[in-house]
């Protein structure tokens, strides 16, 4: 058997005030999760705890994302997560307030024949 990707979902999230990369990343993950339904997992009798979940977060400053918080936000599966350069920072015009936009890609894989 081999791991096969069965779903790829994307989401976006932001922190409009404060420049919190983790907050934006968590919102992007939740956005992606709310676009998905994995009903086929139960229909096919697959063990939801054995699915492999790979999360990639895109933000301008990847080292500022709390990846443990991102991993813990996923409800099922064996989760791996990484942050890469991406997303968007939007500086405030007359203040030091920055808006952060994050992208998330969530791939789910199962060991299938």
Image: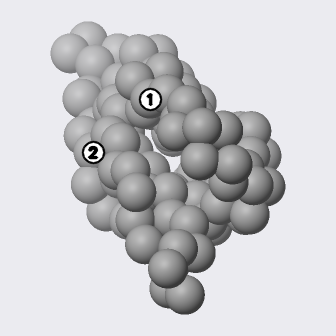
Kindly identify which numbered label has been placed on residue 87: 2
Q: Position of residue 69 (x, y in %)?
A: 74, 46
Kindly identify which numbered label has been placed on residue 36: 1
Mark positioned earlier in the residue sequence (2 or 1):
1
Q: Position of residue 31 (x, y in %)?
A: 44, 24
Residue at (35% x, 15% y) in the render: 95
Tell me, what colour scheme is on the image?
Answer: one colour
Question: Do residues under tags 2 and 1 come within 8 Å of each other at their CB atoms?
Answer: no
Residue at (66% x, 38% y) in the render: 42
In the image, 19 versus 48, the foreground residue is 48
Q: Position of residue 113 (x, y in %)?
A: 49, 79
Label 2, secondary structure: give it: loop
The nearer-to-camera label among 2 and 1 is: 1
Q: Position of residue 15 (x, y in %)?
A: 46, 22
Residue at (40% x, 24% y) in the render: 35
Q: CA distance from mark 2 to mark 1?
A: 22 Å
The N terminus - image quarter: bottom right
For residue 35, above or below residue 75 = above
| Residue count near mark 1 (Cα–Cα under 10 Å), binned few <14, some 14–19, many ≥20 | few
Kindly identify which numbered label has been placed on residue 99: none
In the image, 12 versus 54, the foreground residue is 54
Label 1, secondary structure: give it: loop
């Amino acid at each position: 058997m081999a791991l096969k990707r069965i779903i790829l979902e994307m989401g976006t999230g932001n922190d409009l005030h404060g420049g919190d990369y983790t907050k934006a990343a968590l919102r992007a993950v939740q956005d992606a999760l709310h676009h998905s339904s994995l009903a086929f997992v139960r229909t096919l009798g697959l063990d939801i705890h054995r699915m492999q979940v790979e999360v990639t977060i895109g933000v301008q400053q990847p080292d500022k994302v709390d990846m443990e918080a991102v991993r813990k936000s996923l409800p099922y599966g064996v989760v791996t997560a990484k942050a890469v350069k991406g997303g968007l920072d939007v500086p405030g015009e007359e203040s030091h307030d920055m808006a952060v936009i994050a992208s998330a890609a969530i791939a789910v894989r199962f060991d299938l024949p």
